[in-house]
């Protein structure tokens, strides 16, 4: 399998800030490269693709999966990493250093910066401060494009297409950044119909609803009985506690919609895959984990690694 072909990647040197900047051509390139990564995962050649590179992980917000899968992806390709979790406690940020200064410094040390930050727009701010490529690993409640990449890649592997899919996206559609990026991704392919299930208070932001519904069919529903039969996927999310100023309000709505065996039996199709970006905090019963349709602890996790390896390789080589 040839990974070091001479054709220049359209993503070379690029920032990945919002899913809105990707088109279907870029996506198919990422997914093809992810397929290659999957097949050549343990090859010596793959392990040396980025052996002369240094990647910084700068995570101002908690993370386990995204942080570790990016770190693993970089290391699997032979890159070295500078890993900074909680810089608000351990770095100069605590002394009041601006984000721009922090980014400028790390861009001298490394070839690419992967950043998570609680502020909407922080990734763009970082990208404007440096020529070094920035990957947005989540900026506040705005976007999380690489999670959407692995979500779409998981769907593509299951259905062999990303168009004409019927799915439910449930939970916190207001603050859930993975949902925002995923909907932008699904809107690039024709014929998709997405049912949006959330408490009224956590509906998709109107601006995003209007943007996406120009391209695909979005249907807002307010209870589980309205879930249509034979969906291709259910994509559940947690209510984003950290975005609430009033915790009582969070407690009241955190478990508005839960996947339990009864709901799955009643509304799930034989081929309906069950997805979640994780962490889950009670929205999916543990009894569902062993169901062959559940992919949140299996395929989604593995695909996250392949897609992130693909992305790092396409940006850095
Ligand atoms: C998500 C996030 O950080 O936005 N987690 C992840 O990266 N997979 C989802 C969440 O925190 O609910």
Image (cartoon, grey):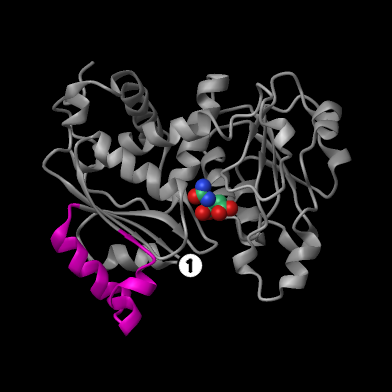
Q: Is residue 160 left or right of residue 310?
A: right
Q: Is residue 19 left or right of residue 98?
A: right
Q: Residues within 10 Å of mark 1 (few under 14, many from 20)?
A: some
Q: Is residue 225 left or right of residue 2?
A: right
Image quadrant in which you'd find residue 129: bottom left
Direction bottom: furthest residue:
96
Q: Quadrant of the N terminus?
A: top left
Task: State whether residue 314 appears in this view.
Answer: no
Residue 97 lies, with reference to residue 307, above or below; the image says below
State the residue at coordinates (27%, 41%).
Answer: 74
Is residue 235 or residue 213 the one in the foreground? Answer: 235
Task: State whether residue 240 appears in this view.
Answer: yes
State the residue at coordinates (53%, 29%).
Answer: 298
Is residue 157 or residue 218 the one in the foreground? Answer: 157
Q: Which residues are magenta?
A: 84-111
Q: Is residue 312 left or right of residue 252?
A: left
136 falls in the magenta region: no
Residue 59 lies, with reference to residue 269, above or below; the image says below
Q: Which residue is mark 1?
A: 120
Q: Position of residue 85 (x, y in %)?
A: 36, 61
Q: Position of residue 63 (x, y in %)?
A: 46, 55
Direction top: furthest residue:
1
Q: Position of residue 61 (x, y in %)?
A: 45, 63
SS assignment at label 1: loop
State the residue at coordinates (67%, 51%).
Answer: 281
State the residue at coordinates (29%, 80%).
Answer: 97
Q: Position of residue 5 (x, y in %)?
A: 16, 24
Residue 231 lies, with reference to residue 61, above or below; the image says above
Direction left: furthest residue:
52
Q: Quadrant of the C terminus?
A: top left
């Amino acid at each position: 399998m040839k990974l070091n072909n001479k054709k220049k990647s359209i993503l070379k040197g690029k920032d990945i800030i919002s899913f809105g900047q990707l088109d279907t051509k870029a996506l198919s390139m990422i997914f093809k490269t992810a397929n290659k990564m999957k097949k050549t995962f343990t090859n010596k050649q793959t392990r040396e693709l980025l052996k002369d590179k240094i990647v910084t992980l700068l995570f101002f917000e908690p993370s386990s999966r995204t942080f570790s899968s990016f770190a693993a992806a970089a290391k699997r390709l032979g890159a070295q990493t500078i890993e900074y979790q909680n810089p608000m406690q351990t770095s100069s940020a605590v002394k009041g250093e601006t984000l721009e200064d922090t980014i400028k410094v790390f861009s001298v040390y490394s070839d690419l910066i992967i950043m998570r930050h609680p502020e909407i727009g922080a990734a763009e701010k970082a990208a404007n401060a440096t020529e070094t490529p920035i990957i947005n690993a989540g900026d506040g409640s705005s976007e999380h494009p690489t999670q959407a990449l692995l979500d779409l890649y998981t769907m593509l592997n299951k259905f062999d297409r990303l168009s004409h899919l019927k799915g439910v996206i449930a939970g916190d559609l207001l603050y859930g950044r993975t949902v925002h990026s995923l909907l932008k991704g699904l809107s690039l392919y024709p014929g998709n119909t997405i049912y949006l299930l959330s408490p009224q208070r956590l509906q998709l932001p109107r601006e995003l609803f209007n943007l996406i519904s120009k391209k695909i069919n979005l249907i807002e529903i307010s209870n589980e009985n309205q879930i249509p039969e034979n969906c291709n996927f259910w994509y559940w999310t947690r209510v984003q506690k950290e975005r609430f100023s009033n915790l009582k309000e969070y407690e009241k709505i955190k478990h508005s919609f839960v996947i339990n065996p009864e709901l799955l039996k009643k509304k799930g199709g034989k081929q309906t895959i069950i997805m979640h970006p994780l962490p889950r905090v009670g929205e999916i019963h543990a009894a569902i984990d062993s169901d062959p349709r559940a992919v949140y602890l299996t395929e989604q996790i593995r695909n996250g690694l392949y897609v992130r390896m693909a992305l790092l390789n396409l940006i850095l080589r």
